[in-house]
Image (cartoon, rainbow, N blue to C red):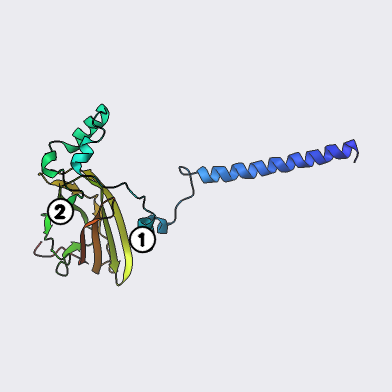
Amino acid sequence: MGFDEKKGEDKKEATAVSETNKVADSDAETDNEGGGGRPMSESSFYTTEEEEDEDTANKIQLGPQVTLKEQFEKDKDDESLRRWKEQLLGSVDINAVGESLEAEVKILSLSILSPGRSEIVLPIPRDGNPPSPWFTLKEGSRYSLKFAFQVSNNIVSGLKYTNTVWKTGMKVDGSKEMIGTFSPQLEPYTHEMPEETTPSGMFARGSYSARTKFLDDDNKCHLEINYTFEIKKEWAATE
């Protein structure tokens, strides 16, 4: 190959590399639009029951449980850890609760709040199966769930709320919310969920079935309630 021919080939290769870089830059710009990544599909926002089982199977195995007293005594020479534990535990009587390995979480009350209406208090059944329907919501109304709970014996880590809703056998909603980590105390804790709006329209009205759970980081279920509720044009007359 002559020198002139070599220059021509080099020029072609340089042009090809330049075009490849342009395509790569274009793809990178597309990927970075809207805050870094392609938009997620709607299905990616919901967790199926199979995915929940997989999450449980792949869950990081935590270390052995220890009593609250042992946790308090551990690393007691570390000043920063000691102050953090005192802040977390508050006025807990270590001698009174320090011999139990597992935290006990008792859900004391559940209620529905809606602007301009009285609080709807939901009685919690011992068997986890309230009468049907458990409550009625007005279509297109704003509401939020509030609950009170008490923690005893030990610290509960990663307490979370999960709720799954079905209509005519089809899953129509699934939600999770992390509530937090709590130390045992005599006074109950309260938590209010983010406000939501019920769907409206002919197809939204009707009867729904649902399952609510309160779980912790050890996947211990502190309360499971299976229930039905209704969405109607108006609130129930007794509420």
Q: Nearer the viewer, residue 181 or 115?
A: 181
Badge 2 crowding class, 10 Å Cα cut-off, few under 14, some 14 to 19, many 20 or more, is some
- Residue 175 point in image, percent of width and height: 30, 56
The residue carrying mark 2 is 106
Left or right of 25: which side holds 183?
left
Q: Residue at x 41, y 56 (%)?
A: 44
Q: Residue at x 25, y 65 (%)?
A: 210
Mark 2 to mark 1: distance in Å? Answer: 25 Å
- Residue 234 point in image, percent of width and height: 17, 64
Hey, which quadrant is residue 236 in on the image?
Answer: bottom left
Residue furthest to the right in view is: 2
Task: Say if residue 43 shows up in the picture.
Answer: yes
Which three-letter amino acid code belongs to the residue tagged 2?
Answer: Lys
Does residue 81 lie above or below 165 as drawn? Answer: above
- Residue 43 point in image, percent of width and height: 41, 59
Q: Residue at x 82, y 41 (%)?
A: 9
* Callout 1: SS: helix
Residue 53 marker:
1
